Image (cartoon, helix red, strand yellow):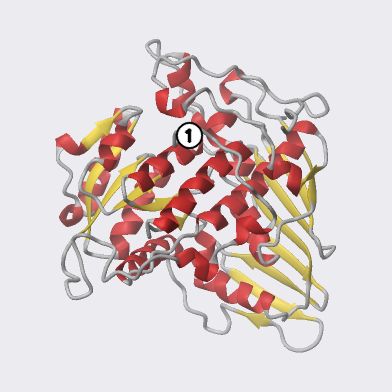
Amino acid sequence: MTSNTPSIIPVTRRSFLGRSAAGLAGAALVSGFPHISNAQDAKAIRIGIVGCGGRGSGALADAMNADPNVVLISMGDTNPEQLETSFKNISVSKPEQVKVDAANRFVGLDAVDKVLATDIDIVLLTTPPGFRPAHLHKAINAGKHVFCEKPLGVDAPSIRHALEAVKKAKEKNLAIQSGFCWRYNLAERATWEKLHAGVIGDIRCYYGTYLGGNAWAPKDRKPEWSDFEYQLRNWIYYTWLSGDHLVEQAVHSVDKMSWAFKDVPPVKCTALAGRQQRVEPQYGNIYDHYSVMYEYPNGGRGFIFARQQQGCSNENSDYIIGSTGTGTVNGFRPLHRLTPDEGPAWDYEKSGGEKNQMYVQEHKELIASIREGKPVNLGEQLAHSSMLAIMGRMSAYTGQTITWEDAIASNETFATGDINELKMDSKAPEVVVPIPGRYKLPKTS
């Protein structure tokens, strides 16, 4: 079986959760960097990036801020203008850490192969999510440590395929760092630690909001663009590339909900969603609002409200109801407060809790784990939360209640053939907006 062919691997509720100590498996090394050892901290940590858009460019700056020894060696993107803008910006902000000559700036769908062929230690995978599983396989096969943005894929077959690379990374003692940034915010870590310690009792209800406007306006089409290139340049509006905004953006809220329930899979979910503002063709086939209810084995409920609509009120908060108290979290304000029914409230900010830059912390911990010879591998956690969001989208598109077992075994795919064979003039997928009650999932074999 070739590495780009999705396979059905045994997936159970527990198989998404085989991390913690097992996630750090591998022979102990003096250092995971060919260019650096614990006694040579002044030598360079060489990185490359595939996907130089807003999130990718942000990840570059975060990696360089995490360690002054990080040096950027190579860059790749399908969009030459985007690549050059990212290169110029990072060259101005971090001139001493940018060592990318013109020969190591690659444009095209094969840019990932060219970046991985350069002499780098870590690759940042920040392309549209539809490419993530194939790129992860390529990176692990090339022997590179990985910073892997969320989500891990856009449908269940792509998640199963990506999990094969996660397993291979463990065998090769390679790192896979997750882009679920809130797990690296000290305030969230302290709050979730107290949640798990039972400060407000057992979690009964979790309500997370991700209510905002459009991510960015669709780009006007140029005459020379094929249908495929037009979709690629407007990737966030096409399910095969983004997974829809519940999977691509609001998955952060889904991940925090899962974290609160100790990453135990839900039994089932039911969702209501659709399009109210995104009625024009340039908005592809994704929805603009979601409401999802997840039912957990202990009887708890998780609710995720997500919206991308202009002119509406915005919020990104989390409200928790426990058996003996309540909690409110808003990482951007910031606000982290737990209020037991009896006894004083706990407030991270008022208690003098330390602030940190969570996006930088991700890279600090990635680099530290590699230096220690114990590369972190959070691929299964990344897969688990990604799959939860995919499950919610499946329920919304079909209008049906979806069980966890049915979700993770699903054959629903949005792939347009072999992702490794795509070209800019490839045939673009048909743009069909799913209608709840009419859209059907393929039968599971």
Q: Is residue 176 visible?
A: no
Decide which of 96, 46 is in the foreground and name it: 46
Q: Residue placed at 58% from the left, 43% from the top?
A: 160
Instruction: Please identify the quarter of the rendering in which residue 311 is found.
Output: top right
User: Secondary structure under badge 1?
Assistant: loop
Instruction: Please identify the quarter of the rendering in which residue 441 is found.
Output: top right
Q: Residue placed at 79% from the left, 77% from the top?
A: 325
Task: Name the outermost residue toward the top.
Answer: 223
Q: Residue placed at 54% from the left, 53% from the top?
A: 382
Residue 366 % position (x, y): 38, 63
Q: Residue placed at 78% from the left, 74% from the top?
A: 202
Residue 188 % position (x, y): 57, 69
Left or right: 370 in relation to 162: left
Q: Quadrant of the C terminus?
A: top right
Q: Tell how many labels.
A: 1
Q: Eyeballing the image, is 9 above or below 264? A: above
Left or right: 419 in relation to 405: left
Left or right: 88 in relation to 203: left
Left or right: 121 in relation to 136: left
Q: Eyeballing the image, is 383 above or below 197? A: above
Instruction: Please identify the quarter of the rendering in which residue 118 is found.
Output: top left
Q: Which residue is mark 1?
A: 1
Residue 222 % position (x, y): 40, 15
Decide which of 181, 36 is in the foreground and name it: 36
Residue 174 % position (x, y): 37, 57
Task: Name the outermost residue toward the front.
Answer: 1
Q: Amino acid at mark 1?
A: Met
Q: Eyeballing the image, is 199 above or below 207? A: below
Decide which of 93, 247 is in the foreground and name it: 247
Q: Is residue 55 visible?
A: yes
